[in-house]
Amino acid sequence: MNKQFSEELNQCISFHGHLCPGLIYGYLVAQKASELLHINRSKDEEIVAVCENDSCAVDALQVILGTSSGKGNLIIQNYGKNAFTIFSRSEKKAYRFSRTTTYAYTGLDSHEFQMLEKKVADGTATIEEKKRQKYLKAIDLIEQPFEAVFKTEETAYHPPDYAPLAPSKPCGLCGEMTMSTRMVSSDTHGLLCIPCSYKRTNLK
Ligand SMILES: [Zn+2]
Ligand SMILES: [Zn+2]
């Protein structure tokens, strides 16, 4: 573990498996959202994160904000955008964080970093060199002021619905228990799970 990092960042690295710029984006957003919305880790669904990408950043939000896909308060709308909206149900407030600048490299040791960038671009970088390049980028991001990395806007409070709960029923074809609101009705076999409904369509 890296001693100079906060405990929370070390937890993110342990969960995610490595330190990378993407994880830092999520870490920075989670810290800023906690500060602006006065939130701690979400035990239930009091915080909701809507992520416009499915990158490494999402893991830091899961660790720090407790937003997880299993609880239904982590929603991925994968537009490939480095943008995140965090809702607090108790404060009835939401903030959207987005990147509007390219990577600045401001604080990086330029000689080493440029050498690594060139090697990565050429395809000649070793695994260690790739790791080092990611590490340098990640450290550079941590050291920048938040405002230099993300634009912050308070947005209208329209949180997604709570995670739906519905009884499970057996599928009319495979017999497997399936959440009834995710089933499709058929003329011949009653309610079907989605994979079975596709199979029937393909058989026709
Ligand atoms: Zn990563
Ligand atoms: Zn089925």
Image (cartoon, grey):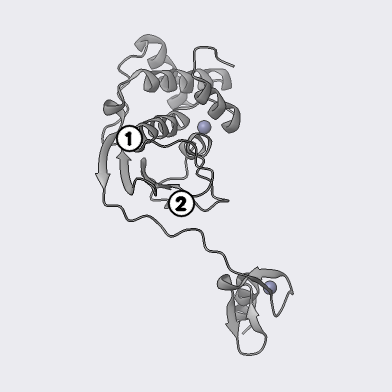
Identify residue type, mark 1.
Leu
Q: Is residue 124 visible in the rendered structure shown here? A: no
Please state the horizontal and vertical placement of residue 51, each as a whole percent of the image: 41, 46
Q: Residue furthest right?
A: 175
Please state the horizontal and vertical placement of residue 9, each as a whole percent of the image: 50, 24
- Residue nearer the viewer, 36 or 138: 36
- Residue nearer the viewer, 202 or 10: 10
Mark 1 residue CB less than 8 A from any atom of ligand 1: no
Report the residue at 38% width, 50% height from top: 79
Disc number lying in front (1 or 2):
1
Identify residue type, mark 2.
Ile
- Residue nearer the viewer, 90 or 21: 90
- Residue nearer the viewer, 148 or 9: 9
Please state the horizontal and vertical placement of residue 65, each as a whole percent of the image: 47, 38
In this rendering, position of residue 24 left or right of residue 19: left
Write down the residue under mark 1: 36
Mark 2 residue CB less than 8 A from any atom of ligand 1: no
Label 1, label 2: how many angstroms apart (C-alpha)? Answer: 20 Å
Report the residue at 37% width, 9% height from top: 111
Report the residue at 46% width, 51% height from top: 75
Write down the residue under mark 2: 75
Report the residue at 40% width, 15% height from top: 113
192, above or below 126, in the image: below
Q: Is residue 98 visible in the rendered structure shown here? A: yes
On the rendered image, what quadrant is the C terminus found in?
bottom right
